[in-house]
Image: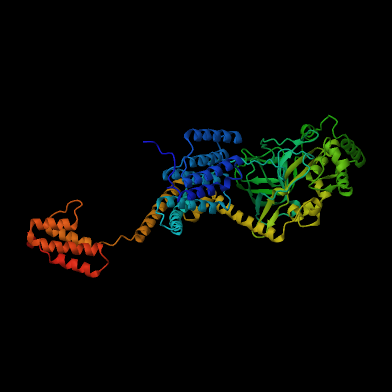
């Protein structure tokens, strides 16, 4: 017999639900998938629907194999890999599209629905946003509905199908909650997902090249959130130290060494009162950790202080982390800095003749000033009193960027001023370095915490003076004091922010954004932050003495068994067995009295005739019982027929029959 390759239209009722489940599962992946995969999926989905509707033949096997190989090669070419969340999601999408082209039966649709479940779960590997939970519920609900539409009669309404799917999810919810609460948590994630951030937006990088970017777009993305144990420092003192750059090649600052220095804390002399706070840092895929200048204590594991008092981590921050820290805002650092370090690290300038006018200006101003402290004040006064402008849209600088900035354009943002100030200090024999981090932060009035955004990224300079150590000097404060005193977030609503190129959002929209961020912070703290420490505290709150993974596993098993027992009892109570057929019960009673077993497939009338053949005296009674049984069971509902059958069976006597 010739093998059937066409379709018969049997999937017309269930195929749209399968396509809807797959499409919904792909929605979170659209921004990460190449355009050719999205177009291919839509083409395969639309083509498969037309094939089923018009009863056409499915594509031949050789074409499907060719498309599968092409899809695999395309994914490898797009991602240069076939492993990881991105390539894996792309392969799942390609697999779903090609599987549609060979779907003939309902069992093939089951495979497609399994793929949709994997796609829904794969979206959680990138990030578990606040909307991830409703998306997960909706995706699961749609997949279960598609499953049920394949398995039940078409007479069942869609509303009843949704109700059944919702009931199944509600049954599973207590078990899911128990697993989430009691299953032992581990400190490290099972996976890490790299985040590509190659756009020229505000934020931090491990190098600084003022003049390469002619337009800086501010990113409102959250860098980290801070909860203070007490009063937050005033805005002008909110310097969040990140990485330190000390090498300069005439254009670019680099030099953030990831090496621990066990004596770094010993070189810090703290003064005043400490500031305690908790930081929730978003993933950066970098190794530096941010803290108020200057950090003195921190709780994050595998974190150390480098030789330039920057906090570094042994591995990149590939997931959201929380840590406590203590900082001192008044301090002195490296008062006894070795002469070798001052010369090789913090006074070095390229000898290729670049930025010559800047070097000459710095030397001349130093001679006039007479001391390093006076020279620093004179340079700051130059920035403050002469026509220098703070802007987020500075002109390109080209070669000799520091000369072009100081003598020609005189327009720039923090990187320009920090770089120019650092070069002038070195030219005059004052050791200097560049610190990259964040400055400012915005208190969220909806909840008691501070938001530090990528738009708060900042660069400032540190200079070394004898008997004083390293001093923070921020030349941006001399040019645009509003940037430091109010912060970038507050400056958006003033005239200064407008002159820098900032656009202030509507107040109601801004307030809505703060409310949404507060909700996200609670989600991150209560749900995504439910790690080993929070789980241990919660177990202790529940009354578990010295929680361990064994105790939590036993508690989990006991809770799951109790829930399964409770759900089983509930289902048993909801179950209503069908009512017993009284006519059939009376007929079985009659058969027991006769003591002749009916044959397979024998009708009541045939059975009565066989009884009459054995004993003619019982023929009339047997025929009467057969007629009344057929009338009571298969005739119109009538209590009289059932009552007549009951009397006939009761009056029948076995002694009369035999």
Spot occupied by residue 389 in the image (x, y as percentages of width and height): 84, 48
Colour setting: rainbow
User: Left of 638 or right of it: where is 388?
Assistant: right
The answer to whether any part of residue 536 appears in the image is: no
Is residue 82 rendered to the left or right of residue 473?
A: left
- Quadrant showing the N terminus: top left
Residue extending furthest bottom? 640
Residue 516 drawn at (x, y percent): 63, 57
Q: Nearer the viewer, residue 654 or 59?
A: 59
Whole-percent x and y of residue 404? Answer: 86, 39
Q: Quadrant of residue 313?
A: top right
Q: Quadrant of the C terminus?
A: bottom left
Q: Is residue 634 visible in this depiction of the protein? A: yes
Residue 301 rendering spot, x and y as whole percentages: 60, 42
Please tell me which residue lies in front, 553 or 572: 572
| 450, above or below 638, in the image | above
**In the image: residue 639, left or right of residue 317:** left
């Amino acid at each position: 017999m010739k093998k059937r390759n066409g379709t018969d239209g049997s999937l017309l009722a269930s195929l749209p639900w399968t396509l809807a489940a797959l499409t919904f599962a792909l929605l979170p992946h659209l921004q990460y998938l190449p355009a050719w995969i999205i177009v291919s999926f839509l083409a395969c989905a639309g083509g498969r629907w037309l094939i089923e509707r018009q009863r056409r033949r499915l594509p031949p096997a050789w074409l499907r194999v060719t498309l599968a190989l092409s899809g695999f090669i395309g994914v490898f070419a797009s991602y240069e890999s076939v492993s990881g969340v991105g390539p894996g999601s792309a392969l799942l999408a390609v697999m779903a599209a090609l599987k549609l082209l060979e779907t003939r039966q309902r069992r093939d649709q089951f495979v497609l629905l399994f793929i949709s479940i994997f796609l829904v779960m794969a979206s959680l590997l990138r990030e578990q946003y606040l909307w991830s939970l409703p998306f997960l519920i909706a995706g699961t609900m749609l997949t279960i509905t598609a499953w049920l539409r394949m398995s039940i009669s078409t007479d069942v309404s869609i509303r009843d199908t949704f109700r059944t799917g919702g009931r199944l999810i509600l049954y599973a919810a207590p078990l899911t909650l128990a697993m989430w609460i009691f299953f032992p948590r581990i400190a490290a994630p099972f996976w890490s997902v790299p985040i590509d951030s190659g756009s020229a937006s505000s934020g931090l990088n491990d190098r600084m090249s003022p003049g390469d970017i002619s337009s800086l777009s501010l990113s409102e993305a959250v860098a980290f959130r801070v909860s203070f144990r007490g009063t937050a420092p005033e805005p002008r003192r909110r310097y969040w130290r990140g990485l330190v750059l000390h090498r300069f090649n005439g254009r670019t600052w680099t030099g953030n060494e990831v090496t621990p220095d066990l004596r770094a804390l010993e070189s810090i002399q703290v003064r005043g009162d400490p500031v305690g706070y908790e930081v929730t840092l978003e993933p950066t895929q970098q190794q530096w950790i941010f803290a108020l200048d200057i950090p003195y204590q921190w709780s994050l594991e595998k974190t150390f202080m480098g030789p330039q008092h920057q906090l570094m981590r042994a591995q990149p921050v590939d997931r959201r982390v929380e840590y406590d820290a203590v900082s001192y805002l008044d301090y002195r650092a490296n008062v006894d800095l070795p002469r070798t370090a001052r010369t090789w690290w913090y006074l070095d300038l390229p000898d290729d003749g670049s930025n010559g006018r800047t070097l000459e200006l710095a030397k001349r101003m130093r001679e006039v000033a007479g001391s390093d402290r006076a020279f620093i004040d004179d340079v700051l006064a130059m920035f403050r009193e002469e026509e220098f402008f703070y802007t987020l849209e500075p002109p390109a600088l080209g070669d000799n960027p520091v000369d072009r900035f100081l003598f020609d354009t005189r327009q720039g943002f923090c990187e320009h001023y920090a770089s120019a100030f650092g070069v002038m200090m070195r030219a005059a024999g004052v050791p200097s370095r560049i610190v990259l981090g964040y400055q400012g932060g915005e208190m969220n009035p909806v909840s008691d915490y501070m938001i530090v955004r990528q738009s708060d990224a900042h660069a400032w300079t540190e200079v070394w003076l004898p008997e004083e150590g390293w001093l923070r000097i921020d030349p941006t404060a001399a040019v645009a004091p509003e940037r430091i005193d109010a912060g970038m977030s507050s400056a958006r609503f003033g005239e200064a922010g407008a002159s820098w190129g900032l656009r202030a959002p509507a107040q109601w929209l801004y307030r809505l954004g703060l409310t949404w961020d507060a909700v996200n912070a609670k989600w991150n703290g209560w749900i995504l932050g439910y790690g080993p420490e929070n789980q241990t505290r919660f177990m202790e709150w529940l009354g578990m003495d010295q929680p361990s993974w064994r105790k939590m596993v036993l508690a989990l098993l006991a809770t799951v068994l109790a829930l399964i027992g409770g759900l089983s009892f509930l289902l048993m109570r909801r179950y209503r067995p069908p009512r017993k057929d009284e006519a059939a019960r009376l007929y079985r009673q009659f058969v027991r009295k006769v003591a002749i077993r009916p044959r397979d497939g024998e009708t009541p009338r045939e059975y009565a005739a066989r009884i009459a053949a054995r004993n003619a005296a019982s023929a009339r009674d047997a025929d009467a019982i057969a007629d009344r049984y057929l009338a009571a069971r298969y005739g119109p509902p009538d209590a009289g027929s059932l009552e007549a059958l009951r009397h006939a069976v009761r009056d029948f006597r076995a002694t009369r029959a035999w």
